[in-house]
Amino acid sequence: MADELGSWNDGKAKSAITGFVRSVTEEGDLFVSAADRVAAFDNDGTLWVEQPLPPQFGFLIETWMNEVKQNPALAKEQPYKALIEKDPQFFAALQVQVPDAVSAVMQAAGRSWEGTAPEDFDAQVREWLARSKQPKFGRRYDRLVYKPMLELFGYLRANDFRVFVCSGGGRDFMRVFAEDAWGIHKENVIGTAADYEYKDGKLLRANKPLGGVALGPGKPEHIFAQTGRMPLLAGGNGDVDIEMLAAARFALLIEHDDGEREVAYTSGADKALSAAKQHGWTVVSMKDDWAAIF
Amino acid sequence: MADELGSWNDGKAKSAITGFVRSVTEEGDLFVSAADRVAAFDNDGTLWVEQPLPPQFGFLIETWMNEVKQNPALAKEQPYKALIEKDPQFFAALQVQVPDAVSAVMQAAGRSWEGTAPEDFDAQVREWLARSKQPKFGRRYDRLVYKPMLELFGYLRANDFRVFVCSGGGRDFMRVFAEDAWGIHKENVIGTAADYEYKDGKLLRANKPLGGVALGPGKPEHIFAQTGRMPLLAGGNGDVDIEMLAAARFALLIEHDDGEREVAYTSGADKALSAAKQHGWTVVSMKDDWAAIF
């Protein structure tokens, strides 16, 4: 078992994980049937680098800046205005889910791909992923998935857990690379999503703002809708993961404290770090608990 | 392989199924990667007996009749009025999805379980299932799953397909018995569903009519939302399955032609039977193709 977590240093975090998994898989009072072994993980900052911006923002910003070039009148509206003015207040509002900011982004995302077929959206994401590089590491975003988390996925699967990813990011965006990068099927990827309409034998994106943002309480809501269960084990790294972590029997909070090998920051995670202390969640120090990051 | 389909008589339907599965799993031009092997099946009339009414209607009718007893004013409104008057027109309208009839049912379903926790809803369904009997066969509905279909699930899984059920019926209703009766996890059950809200550490049914009915075009829409794919293989038995069957590479249509061992009827399946001819779908005669029904 320890071999499966080879990039994890021995310590409190690793022991807590293996201890919990043993407790629910071995006969005894804490045993949990395999059917109930659902694990759910956030993506941005939990599985891959989210600084300076969650990667999907790069894809969205590029798309929207191109739209403004085609149609300069958009520059007066959000979220285009904030992008042009590089308005930090708008992005801060987005991070704490101020309804107007979220709604502007959901409307723009709805508009940009209205009428798009899934295979065309996928091709756009693939093309963007292939040529985009994370600025600090100079590598494709989907090659910057944390190795210890991939090992954790394998370890959980070996113990008959079913691993899901639940992100505020786009469900269909993540599904493009989920199978290659994470080794999990598309149906195990949960996120904010567009509606599609099936008409005349074709499935196309509907003309609607995106709804049902999978952040905060939206995470347990989406996990239940997709899986019919609350997670037995959950992992996250930010304030928007608190409800998902609280809904799980065992929770991991990834702490970004390795400025050398990754990026050191606590912004957007202050409440989560307090909640971890309060609830006894397992805090994973990237610096101390991970022998390798990528 | 043939053993896994022991309740299927040798014949065109069985050969078509095994021929298709071989073609996509063996090396060659038609090979399909395991990731893309998604199978989707309707429930009512495809997996279990739907006559004289889809079983879930029994559960709904009982609930709503009790509500009318508590609150007689409801008797003037739909769907309660139709239940009391045993109005065949209302039920006919429901079957062909007349919007007013569907909307009345979705509103009533939303109202009846508003604020209910998943475990309480599950307990109600379990209690009802345990004491309800299909009138012709005198057995619990969840013991009346067609044996050949369960064998087909096993055969598909043995060939690295992932099996989903997609029904116009309630997602959460089906998830109560899916794991025992069908051997598939809750997350592989897709259907019409209520919204839930996570608040103060609890997940409860929202105060909203049910939306997104998984019938007709709603089936491929729901299957894509849940799985990120269109089905490679699909099975259904009625007009409301046509779009799902059309979206699949290989389609099965179950024909209810065995009045002795099951129930013989074509109502609600006339268009589907024509579509099967037109598209070359494989029609499964319960009478001729199945050596055993249950």
Image: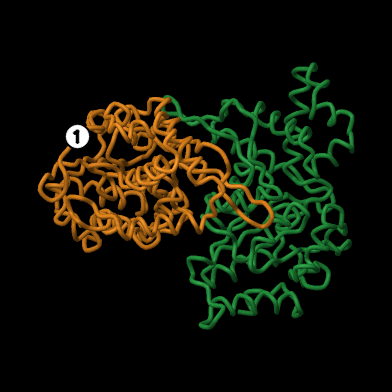
Chain colours: A orange, B green
Question: In the figure, residue A255 lies in which quadrant?
Answer: top left
Question: In the figure, residue B5 lies in which quadrant?
Answer: bottom right
Q: Which residue is at the front of the view, B255 or B212?
A: B212
Q: Report helix, strand or loop for mark 1.
A: loop
Counting every numbered tag in the picture gives 1
Picture coordinates of residue A242, whole percent (x, y)? 33, 33
Picture coordinates of residue B231, whole percent (x, y)? 59, 61
Q: Is residue A83 visible?
A: yes
Q: Which residue is at the front of the view, A81 or A132?
A: A81
Question: Quadrant location of the N terminus of chain B?
Answer: bottom right
Question: Quadrant location of the C terminus of chain B?
Answer: bottom right
Picture coordinates of residue A273, whole percent (x, y)? 22, 32
Q: In the figure, is residue B35 to the left or right of B51?
A: left
- Reading the image, the residue beneath label 1 is A266
Picture coordinates of residue A77, whole percent (x, y)? 42, 29
Q: Residue furthest bottom?
A: B28
Report the chain holding disc 1: A
Q: In the figure, is residue B166 to the left or right of B102?
A: left
Q: In this view, does A161 lie above or below A86?
A: below
